């Protein structure tokens, strides 16, 4: 028996611990096989479902996706993530191989971002090592990918609060600070803001994402695309739901991209009863605008303290108040005629603290 055959024989009859070791160095030290080292690194890279989602989003970004849709749900302790994009797509022969270590399409490039290095061919491998289930649901070269990953949250933890949307604050240095629990929503918001010039990102339940994809497809799918498409396979994944003519077809297309739902839900989406979600950047911008328009907490406290100290009330010139009263009286005349009120009543104004009080007696017309 040659040396190679002997090694194979020993590995076959020994327990699993021997299969993970390349060399026994003595004294309790061993050199791990590269496969075992990679597995341990992958288990370390993803410690929560939020980490896994970031890896999936980076994968879509590196596939040159411009639209990314995340459907998320949790049932019986299992967190399900479905990420649908319009990126480069994956050849059918590679759908399982891309989950193996060191398999990458980025031979000459690596991407460094705020989450570290990406492009080593380890991200999807790390997802598979940590997931209870992971697979490419659907993909076509040039037309995007739908990828599903399911995690047992007893093994791969996640934040308890998954419903709180993060808050955004403009700092003194004109940068954006994100506050709130580091849940899936916050992970997506941080990614969306970091890549706001490259990617539009949406997150919601399966039905909300299906409604969003349906609306997006109807808004962007051309008549030529609809006319000459030989089937849904000819259409970008993110627009396919717009081809559905009825709720049964809607369910079939949705399921083919990882979004399972009842015909009743599909009917409600097609009737507009389930609304599409806004992109995360739209929500972030709305939050920032609301913050800038709202008076600051410090300003409110200062006004309250000034009032308590007996600050003098706002002063209006008598002629300005008289002119204002005349305008109010004119407007009240129209209202009083509609409700049979006496319009010839004395109207008075008074400044009290930080309020302008207008008094109009309401009496029935004689």
Image (cartoon, rainbow, N blue to C red):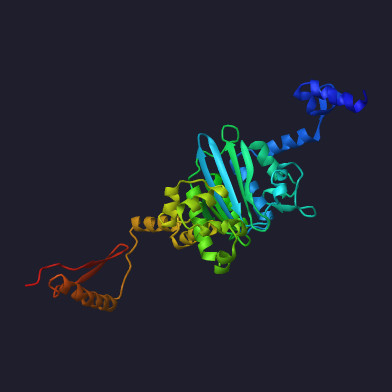
- Check the image and report above or below for 302 versus 135: below
- Left/right placement of residue 321 relative to residue 254 reads left
- Visible in this render: residue 321? yes
- On screen, 78 above or below 58? above
Residue located at (64% from left, 58% from top) = 143
Q: Is residue 171 visible?
A: no
Camera-side residue of 72 and 288: 72
Between 236 and 163, the one lying in front of the other is 236
Residue 47 point in image, percent of width and height: 63, 38
Left of 36 or right of it: where is 54?
left
Q: Is residue 39 left or right of residue 152?
A: right
Residue 145 location (% of width, % of height): 63, 52
Q: In the image, residue 44 lies at what x, y percent?
A: 69, 37
Residue located 79% across and 52% down the image: 107
Q: Position of residue 199 (x, y in %)?
A: 61, 59
Quarter of the picture containing the N terminus is top right
């Amino acid at each position: 028996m040659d040396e190679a055959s002997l090694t194979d024989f020993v590995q076959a009859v020994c327990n699993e611990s021997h299969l993970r070791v390349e060399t026994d160095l003595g004294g309790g030290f061993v050199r791990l096989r590269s496969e075992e080292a990679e597995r341990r690194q992958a288990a370390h890279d993803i410690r929560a479902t939020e980490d896994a989602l970031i890896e999936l989003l980076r994968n879509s970004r590196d596939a040159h996706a411009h639209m990314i849709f995340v459907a998320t749900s949790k049932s019986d302790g299992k967190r399900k993530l479905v990420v649908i994009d319009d990126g480069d797509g994956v050849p059918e022969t590679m759908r399982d191989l891309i989950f193996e270590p060191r398999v990458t399409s980025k031979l000459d490039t690596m991407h460094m971002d705020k989450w570290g290095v990406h492009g080593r061919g380890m991200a999807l491998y790390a997802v598979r090592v940590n997931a209870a289930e992971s697979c490419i649901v659907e993909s076509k070269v040039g037309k995007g990918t739908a990828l599903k990953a399911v995690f047992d949250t007893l093994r791969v933890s996640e934040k308890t609060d998954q419903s709180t949307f993060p808050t955004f604050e403009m700092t003194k240095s004109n940068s954006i600070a994100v506050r709130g629990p580091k849940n899936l929503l916050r992970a997506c918001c941080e990614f969306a803001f970091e890549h706001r010039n490259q990617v539009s990102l949406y997150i919601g339940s399966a039905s909300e994402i299906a409604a969003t994809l349906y609306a997006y497809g109807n808004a962007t799918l051309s008549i030529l695309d609809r006319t000459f498409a030989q089937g849904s396979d000819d259409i970008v994944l993110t627009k396919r739901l717009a081809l559905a003519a009825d709720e049964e077809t809607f369910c079939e297309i949705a399921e083919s991209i990882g979004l399972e739902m009842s015909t009743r839900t599909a009917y409600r989406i097609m009737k507009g009863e389930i609304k599409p979600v806004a992109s995360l950047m739209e929500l972030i911008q709305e939050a920032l605008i609301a913050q800038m328009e709202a008076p600051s907490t410090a300003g409110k406290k200062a006004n309250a303290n000034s009032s308590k100290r007996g600050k003098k009330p706002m002063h209006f010139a008598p002629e300005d108040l008289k002119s204002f009263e005349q305008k109010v009286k004119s407007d009240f005349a129209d209202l009083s005629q509609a409700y049979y009120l006496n319009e010839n009543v004395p109207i008075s104004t008074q400044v009290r603290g930080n309020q302008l009080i207008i008094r109009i007696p309401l009496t029935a017309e004689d």
